[in-house]
Image (spheres, rainbow, N blue to C red):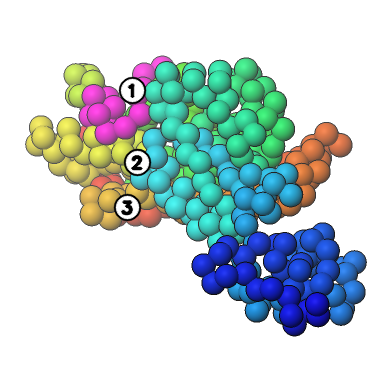
Amino acid sequence: MTDSETVQPAADARVTIVDVASRAGVSISTVSRTLRGHRNVSADRRARVLLAASDLAYVPSPAASRLASGRTGAIGVIVQFVARWFFAEVVRGAELELREAGYDLLLYNVGDPASRSHLFQTMPLRRRVDAVLAIATSFSESESAALDRLGVPVVVVGDTVSRGRAGVGIDDQESAAMAVRHLALLGHQHIVMISGCADDPIGRGTTLARQAGFRLGMREAGLPERPDQIVTEPWGVDGGRRAMERLLTRRQLPTAVFAESDEIAYGVLQTLRRVGLDVPGAVSVVGFDDHELAPASDLTTIAQPVHDQGRLAARMVLDLVADPGAADQAVDGRERAHIVLPTRLVVRGTTGPPRKDS
C-alpha cells in the first residue's frame, strides 16, 4: 500500500500521531521530533510529516506534549487577596503574558492565616506547576524552604526584602522618601505616617521599606523623629479610618499624613471629611500606588507601574522555565535577576501648604 492509499481515519474519529505517522510513512518518533522542531529530521521526511499533519488536520495533544517535556503547563500564583486592586492588576498583567505562551494559572489565595498555613504545610503546588509567582508576600524561613523543595523557579513581585529570589518591584524606601520630600517642600513639619503592621504577612517587606523611607525623608528635611510619628493599623481602608481617628484624639493634629497605600489613604480621607476637616486646608494627605480610584478621590500619590510588574515577572518566569539553570546563578556569587521599576509623584488636590496658624 502506498502513502496515498493509506487508510484515512473516519471523519468523526480523533486524529492521532499514529495516523500522521501512517500517512507519512514514517515512525511515530519522527513525527514527534518534526512537530517539536527538532533539526535531526531529513528535509524529505519533515515535508511528508507536515503534509500529512495538514491533510489530516492533526492537532497535537497538549497533555501529551507536556508529558513528553516533563512540564505541567501551569504556573502557580500565590496571592494575598486576588479581588483587591493591586493584586488583581498584577495577576492581569502576568496572565496576558502567560496565556499567550500557552500556560495556565493556578491561583492560591493566602489572605488569611488558615489558608496560608494549609498552602505551606500541604504544598498542593507540588508536581502541578512549572514555576511559582508570588505577589506582595514575604516568606518565613520555613515557608521559603518549602518553596525551595518544590524544585521549580520562584519569582517574587513587589517585596523588596526577597532579593535572594528573582523578582520585579520598585524602590519602596526611596518612593516613600519622595512623598515626605513633597510635603516638606510645601512647608509641612508635623508629618505622620499611617502604615500597616510590620508583623503582618501581607507585604511585610514593603511595610518595613516604606517606613524606612518615611524616616529617611524626615531626616533629609531636618525634621525631628518622634516615637509616635508612625501609626500602625492592619492594612486597608478600615485601618486608615481607625488610625486617623486615633490621631484626632491627640492634643496636636498633624498638618500632613503620608499613607502607606492609597487604600489606607481612602480611610484617612473618609474620617477627615466625616468630622468636617478640610483637605488639604487642615490636613494634607499623600497615598501610595495610584490606585484606579485615586484620580476620582483627587488623591496625591506615589504612582507605581503595577500592571508592568506582573507582565515583566511573567516574562521572567517564562525565561526561568525555559532555562532552569539560570535560577541557580546566585550560587556562583551573582545576584538573581531583580528588576526595579521607577515610581513618580502625582500631585492632585489632597496636598497643599499648611495653614499659617498650624
Q: Which mark is residue 83?
A: 2
In percent of the image, x 83 and y 34: which residue is there? 331
User: Pointer 2 and pointer 1: residues touching (CB < 8 Å)?
Assistant: no
Where does label 3 land, which residue?
A: 292
Marks 2/1: CA–CA distance: 21 Å
In percent of the image, x 48 and y 31: which residue is there? 203
Q: Which mark is residue 233?
A: 1
Q: Pick whichever, 283 or 32, lies toward us.
A: 32
Upstream in the sequence, badge 3 or badge 2? Answer: 2
Residue 232 forms part of the magenta stretch: yes
Residue type for callout 3: Glu
Q: Which residues are magenta?
A: 226-243
Residue 4 in the image: above or below residue 290: below
Marks 1/3: CA–CA distance: 23 Å
Element at badge 3?
A: loop
Residue type for callout 1: Glu
Residue type for callout 2: Ala
Upstream in the sequence, badge 2 or badge 1? Answer: 2
